Amino acid sequence: MVSNAKLPAEFSAPTDMCRNSSPERHYAKHPPSGLARRRVRFPDRYTGPGRAAMLAAVISLGLLSGTQALAREWHFDVSVDRLPIGSHDLVLNENGDARSVKSDMRFGMLGMNAYQQHEEETWQGNCLARLESRTEEKGNVTTVAGRLEAGAFVIDGPRGQEKLPACVMSFAYWNLRVLKQTHLVNVQTGAWTPVKVQDLGKEPYTLRGSSVEASHFRLDTERSRIEVWYSPAGEWIGLRSTTRDGHVLSYQLK
């Protein structure tokens, strides 16, 4: 047990230190059983018109439709300067171009939660359609809300109301398209944050005790340097962020 440990004074969650990104297709601890792999069997008594009616009912429920709802999950252990401080859990649901994300961060020391954030996002394709976040840091609560409105993405947060372009992205490392952006939304502050992205090539990365060849990228903001790793399948598998005064935040998949 670490005694007298404190979080860095300027430490905040990986929004522009992270947040708002497995060699196998990462469905966390559950294999992709999914509706897409489910076979529908009919009892022998369903024949003729009755069988056709049953089939139509099943299709109307989406069990045989072409667009299936898929869920992916990421569960990370988080450390600062190699000291365990908490976790970040993220669940992504996809149904065609519609996506919804729920993110929960809980960071602290010695059983005390110095930082908590709950955030929800709705996406249409690769564009944010809605976001809501609530962050509690050392007793101070910050909320941010964003929505598409009249051809712009409107954000209400600590900085007041801001209008951004209609298609924006947060620090959503699960989506490789963040690596093509020049600005990303910080979901804790609502800030439209400039980023510079650099491809650092491929390198060995230890994932759950095994080495995989990962793609390594770096995102630079005014506050920090953020490094992210992706599996050969393009799945987000790791993160490391270094603040201006040298503290290192690390993510490791459970």
Image (cartoon, grey):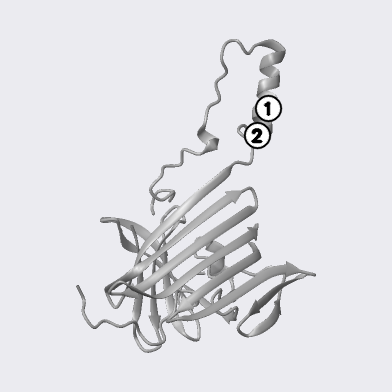
Where residue 85 sits in the image (x, y, percent)? Answer: 32, 72
User: Which amino acid does the dot numbered 1 rest on?
Assistant: Ala
Which labelled disc corresponds to residue 19?
none
Where residue 24 sits in the image (x, y, percent)? Answer: 40, 48
The C terminus: image quadrant: bottom left
User: Which amino acid does the dot numbered 2 rest on?
Assistant: Leu
Q: Is residue 154 above or below residue 215?
A: below
Between residue 131 and residue 137, name the one nearer to us.
137
Which labelled disc corresponds to residue 57?
1
- Residue ID at (53%, 70%): 171
2 and 1 marks in contact (CB < 8 Å) = yes
- Residue ID at (50%, 39%): 34
**Mark 1 burial class by Cα count in 10 Å: few <14, some 14-19, many 20+:** few
Between residue 238 and residue 148, name the one nearer to us.
148
Q: Is residue 163 above or below residue 35?
A: below
Residue 183 appears in the picture as rendered: no
Q: Quadrant of residue 248?
A: bottom left
Which labelled disc corresponds to residue 61?
2
- Residue ID at (48%, 51%): 72
The N terminus: image quadrant: bottom left
Q: Secondary structure at mark 2?
A: loop
Where residue 31 sits in the image (x, y, percent)? Answer: 41, 42
